[in-house]
Amino acid sequence: MALVFAPGRGETLTLFCRLAQQAGLCVCQHQQYDAQVWDVHLKVRDQRKLTESNPAIIENHFPQSLFKMGETGERIIAARPAGLR
């Protein structure tokens, strides 16, 4: 099992997911994996919309959470990073 946090910019994340699926892994993507992290993301995104000419950059750099389903179909739940407890 592996937990991967990666931004969606470029093609790297898409290619990684495709390769993992071709290897027989079930890959799920989630952006709202933690309420506190998501709230901070929304605040930063909204603040940048007011000051930046290209607020889409925030969306491109926000890490998504990917997790593999367990062999028996059991979900692996992402734990909150230690700094956010």
Image: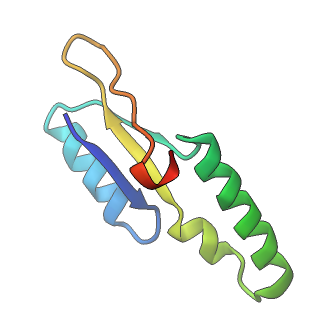
Q: Which picture quadrant has residue 59?
A: bottom right
- Above/below status of 23 relative to 56: above
Side (left or right) of 19 relative to 60: left
**Residue 39, percent from left and from top:** 70, 51
Side (left or right) of 79 relative to 72: right
Residue occupying the point 40% across, 37% down: 79
Residue occupying the point 80% across, 68% down: 46
Could you say which is closer to the camera, residue 23 or residue 82? 82
Q: Which picture quadrant has residue 5?
A: bottom left
Could you say which is closer to the camera, residue 44 or residue 56? 44
Q: Quadrant of the N terminus?
A: top left
Q: Of all residues shown, which one is farthest toward the right? A: 50
Q: Of all residues shown, which one is farthest toward the left? A: 23
- Above/below status of 69 relative to 46: above
Question: In the rendered picture of this protein, how many numbered marks are placed on residues?
Answer: 0
**Residue 53, percent from left and from top:** 76, 89
**Colour scheme of the picture:** rainbow
**Residue 82, percent from left and from top:** 40, 49
Q: Which picture quadrant has residue 2?
A: top left
Side (left or right) of 15 relative to 50: left
